[in-house]
Amino acid sequence: MGSEKVIEEKKQGQALLTNYINGNTKKLYIESYGCQMNLNDSEIVASILSEQGYNTTHLLEEADLVLVNTCSIREKAEQTVRKRLEKYNAVKKINPTMKVGVLGCMAERLKAKFLEEEKIVDLVVGPDAYRDLPNLLAEVNEGRDAVNVILSKEETYGDVSPVRLNSNGVSAFVSITRGCDNMCTFCVVPFTRGRERSRDPKSILEEIKQLDQKGYKEVTLLGQNVDSYLWYGGGLKKDFKNASEIAKATAVDFAQLLDLAATEFPKTRFRFSTSNPQDMSLDVIHTMAKHENICKYIHLPVQSGSTSVLERMNRQHTREEYMELIDNIRKILPECALSQDMITGFCGETEEEHQDTLSLMEYVKYDFGFMFAYSERPGTPAAKKMEDDVPNHVKKRRLNEIIQLQQKHGLYRMEQFVGKTVEVLIEGSSKKSDLHWKGRNSQNAVVVFPKGNEQVGDFVNVFVEDCTSATLIGKKI
């Protein structure tokens, strides 16, 4: 605990000094829901507002400005945000000068309608409009509602240095793409985050360099679809075919970016998320095999094990193509861990199609999984053209079967580490015991072991003695 406390106090002291120098007197409270991209976006927002005199706070009651960064991918996520707004409303009755804003995908989807539905909301800002926050806040301070949800074809925030919120000082996110061109019928992302565009690799490497200089040990490269990363001088990916021959010849794809980062920063450990099966190339897998500092873990959402369901989802891969990709990963990177996203109960899903999903899971035996019952999202092609016809009780039963199978496979994968030594990056104290460290190995498994004279941010070798379906338990050697 001692080393963690010193590190935390040092960070707080540095933050207070920076705020004093910058003259920051206003307080910003920001909450993030949904994907890692939202967390990174909140860090970008905090950076932009720090230039306007705002210092972040963990105390809602003392905030001058409250922002909630939202997710629209499932109905439950939106319900969570609306419940939080009720909490903000209670605080605003005590502190009526406090301003409340909604950011992110939910803001983009509902737009000005949000101001009508949620009376306490003062501003609504989409994912590509964060630079306009100072102007929008000026509008609010003059008594007007403020909305900007215009989607951009160029914005990547590549020149904004994020404020690392709730950071452990060890790992950080670096976004490399924004938007998505894959029009999956169930997904709102293309409508809330716009078309796909990539960030200049020079700005990505510069941000990683800054993190390296600050002592960060691990970087996760982020995008709705990182495998689609393609820099050819700027612009949308869909326009690459019309680029000049020089631009095409000097273009940088994801495998090349990954190689550049791992080569230039050999002491930094790299992860990436999220991949799309249709876009993951063998070059990426070979690059992972080439570098020890690229973690042997791939989050590879499949959504369903049935080709017919995948077709209705407009996923650009079949069951067989996905299995072939898995086979190649196992061959090139036999030690690689895999995780999935799975949707059960999609429109028209039959019992046979559900069994296809279970059999695919048996084939892969994923290390981890993120599983959900289908939730119809307004405005998506599925909502417009397909009937959400799988009864809720059937969805729940199928989801439970998928979860139970994943827990079985998770335990199987964890058991493979027992009796072996793994390298662990210490991230902090275990949630269950201050006497134990918690970290992750290359395969993204959580590892817990007794504390010695190590510090947060150290790489240590741990001999695994036992495990659960989600955690490895061992001792330092």
Image (tube, rainbow, N blue to C red):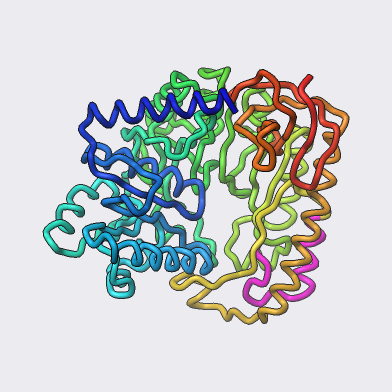
Residue at position x 76%, y 27% in the image: 422
Residue 266 percent coordinates (x, y): 57, 18
Q: What residue is rendered at 81% in x and 41% in y?
A: 414
Residue 256 appears in view: no
Q: What stretch is highlighted in magenta?
A: 343-361
Q: Nearer the viewer, residue 403 or 347?
A: 403
Left/right placement of residue 327 relative to residue 298 reads right
Q: Is residue 130 above or below residue 150?
A: above
Q: In this view, does 31 lie above or below 434?
A: below
- Relative to residue 269, is residue 84 drawn left or right? left
User: Which image quadrant: the N terminus?
Assistant: top right
Q: Can residue 447 be seen in this view?
A: yes
Residue 272 point in image, percent of width and height:
57, 38
Q: Where is residue 268 in the image (x, y as percent from the top left)?
A: 56, 22
Left-right relation of 231 to 51: right
Camera-side residue of 236 and 188: 188
| Quarter of the view holding residue 401 | bottom right
The quarter of the rendered structure image containing the C terminus is top right
x 44%, y 18%: residue: 213
Measured as percent of width and height from the top left, residue 214 is found at 44, 21
Task: Name the outermost residue toward the left.
Answer: 142
Reply yes or no: does residue 353 show up in magenta: yes
